Image (cartoon, rainbow, N blue to C red):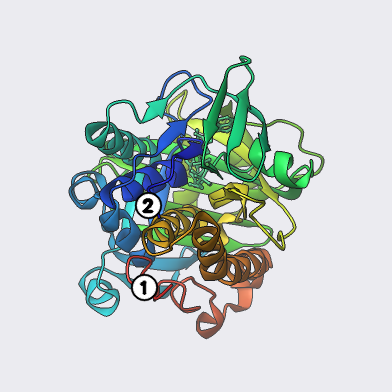
Amino acid sequence: MNKPDIAIIGAGMSGLVAASSLQKLGFTPTVYEKSAVLGEVGAGLTMAPNATHALQFAGMTDALVKHGMSPGRGGVKHWQTGKLMISLERGDELREKFGASYYHIHRADLHAALAAKVLANDAGAIHLGCDFKTLHQDGSKVTVEFASGERLNADVVIGADGVRSGVRAALFGEDQPRFTGYIAFRGLVPFDALPPGIIDPPSCLSTGPDRSFTRYLIRNGQVVNYVALAQRDGWQEEGWSIPATVDEVLQEYQGWYEDVATIIRATPDGSLFKWALCDRATLPAWTQGRVTLMGDAAHPMLPFLGSGAAMAIEDAVILARAFDCSDSIEAALQRYFVARHERTAWVAQKSREAALNYHSGRSEHYEPSKHLTAESLGIWAYNPAKVPI
Ligand SMILES: Cc1cc2nc3c(=O)[nH]c(=O)nc-3n(C[C@H](O)[C@H](O)[C@H](O)COP(=O)(O)OP(=O)(O)OC[C@H]3O[C@@H](n4cnc5c(N)ncnc54)[C@H](O)[C@@H]3O)c2cc1C
């Protein structure tokens, strides 16, 4: 097939990985992003070996080495005693087993590196301030309309516009994401602000009744990223940058072992945010004509297996490969869907189940052999750069 003109809506994780991967395979995609600037937003992301393979395919090997933090060891601690109940290998053995490393990385660092890569390949590839409004298609072209009234024509449109995707709404109708009852507090604490010895092992999940507290190192070990998950009724606010207070988080973790409160108390002003965890029913289809969905737009994931960004990034690489090895747009979109739908629906379901596993209060009688992780489920044993499609 002639190289189609591919428009990607959303310059988030999946949009930029798709752009870079398509460029590598000789395509010239264009990305349209709502934000006027690509700024420093968000906090830490987990990149397990399956995601690392995808990022390496997209040209991010150096960026991972530069900005990623490989913890070496991880573990699960008891919420009251702080006792290490499970020890997890997160270093060389893991790399040998899966052929790629496990990293923690600041979303902003990865995002900036991806944007730089895409722009180095094609300086005109990313258009900012383009707020997708709707689209129309006639069988050979797709016309996209932005909130500004501007329009564009493309052969193919990929909706990579996140959990509140407008492209998904344009294809399948409005269905608001469902608030799951969980909120995530995200804090960034300078490592030096903490007493020595408490960040051991370097990556750690503490699990207790209705709550969990995960913390790991990013930015060359200088920053501790934590995610404190709690449950709430009737959450209304939306966005990635809603400020939270230290007192608000401390209140949720009363009765937990002291290190948790020590880390929360050390959070500087302006480094603590909260957001709602939203879910959606699994879509039976992602594609209509020449438009498809990718990442959170297609399948939002709860964070309990640390696999949301990984699934989005895997999608992006498979989509690029599908275009590369198909002889029509329709065949490429079908190949992509077949390769991705079952896996992402399964991981989404397992992420919901993991929420119960972490928050059921079972740490009183914790059974390490039943601890549900992306590794034990086999999620990491997938290489999107090589898996047959
Ligand atoms: C600003 C931001 C910060 C985040 N921080 C974290 C974090 O710290 N930790 C974490 O685990 N996850 C975070 N996430 C979510 C995480 O990146 C995604 O869940 C995951 O990477 C899936 O990627 P995605 O490409 O599907 O969506 P995203 O990475 O969410 O990207 C979606 C992109 O689409 C753009 N967009 C949305 N609507 C429109 C529109 N109408 N027109 C054009 N563009 C549009 C968004 O601005 C965004 O750039 C963050 C997401 C965002 C947008």
Looking at the rendered structure, the kind of residue marked 2 is: Tyr
Residue 33 lies, in percent from the top left, at: 49, 28
Residue 195 lies, in percent from the top left, at: 31, 44
- Give me the residue at 48% from left, 54% from top: 214
Residue 216 marker? 2
Q: Is residue 155 left or right of residue 46?
A: right
Looking at the rendered structure, the kind of residue marked 1 is: Leu
Residue extending furthest toward the right: 234
Q: Is residue 78 left or right of residue 268?
A: right
* Quadrant showing the C terminus: bottom left
Residue 346 lies, in percent from the top left, at: 61, 71
* Quadrant showing the N terminus: bottom left
- Give me the residue at 31% from left, 59% from top: 52
- Seen in the picture, residue 361 relative to 253 is either above or below; the reply is below
| Callout 1 crowding tier (Cα within 10 Å): few <14, some 14–19, many ≥20 | some
Q: Is residue 34 left or right of residue 48?
A: right
Element marked by disc 1: strand
Choose the circle earlier in sequence order: 1 or 2.
Answer: 1
Residue extending furthest toward the top: 148
User: CA gap, disc 1 to disc 2?
Assistant: 13 Å
Can the viewer see residue 165?
Answer: no
Residue 381 lies, in percent from the top left, at: 39, 76
Element marked by disc 2: strand
Can the viewer see residue 226?
Answer: yes
The residue closer to the viewer here, 138 or 158, is 138
Using the rendered view, name the quadrant where residue 287 is placed. bottom right
- Give me the residue at 33% from left, 45% from top: 27
Residue under label 1, please give it.
Answer: 88
The residue closer to the viewer here, 370 or 103, is 103
The residue closer to the viewer here, 119 or 7, is 7
| Callout 2 crowding tier (Cα within 10 Å): few <14, some 14–19, many ≥20 | many
Residue 59 marker? none
